[in-house]
Amino acid sequence: MNTLTQQNCHYLTPNKTIETISVSNGVKAKTLFIYNYQGISFRVFASKQTLAAFWEGEAEEDQHFETEEELDAFLAHYEL
């Protein structure tokens, strides 16, 4: 099971954020970027480049979840 550490949380509006999360299994670690839209849509990006391309309409998220529970389960077992 992975350990999650929030590195940063940037508020775009009061109910839209981009969270920078470190996912670690004790041996490896990976930084992921999560766009949280009003707590009802969570889009996961594996790189800043993909996140930037998403804002430009040029890419899709790597994963999309509709609940925080689904997101947490994904992150807990994310393969590094």
Image (cartoon, rainbow, N blue to C red):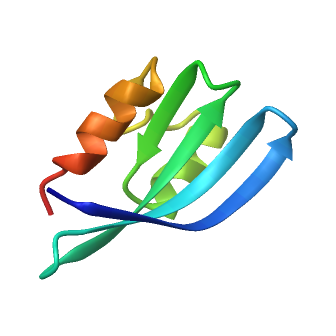
Q: Nearer the viewer, residue 62 or 11?
A: 11
Instruction: Where is residue 32? Give x, y as percent.
Output: 41, 58
At a point 51% along the width and 31% down the height, the residue shown is 42
At a point 52% along the width and 46% down the height, the residue shown is 34
At a point 33% along the width and 26% down the height, the residue shown is 70
Q: Name the image quarter holding residue 5.
A: bottom left
Instruction: Where is residue 25? Give x, y as percent.
Output: 16, 70
Q: Nearer the viewer, residue 1 or 51?
A: 1
Count numbered badges in the picture: 0
Instruction: Where is residue 12? Give x, y as percent.
Output: 82, 45
Instruction: Where is residue 76? Give x, y as percent.
Output: 24, 48
Q: Name the image quarter holding residue 10.
A: bottom right
Image quadrant occupied by the N terminus? bottom left
**Residue at the far right in the pictured view:** 14
At a point 15% along the width and 63% down the height, the residue shown is 80
Q: Name the image quarter holding residue 73.
A: top left
Q: Is residue 3 left or right of residue 33?
A: left
Q: Is residue 10 left or right of residue 6?
A: right
Give the answer, above or below, for where 42 lies relative to 48.
Answer: above
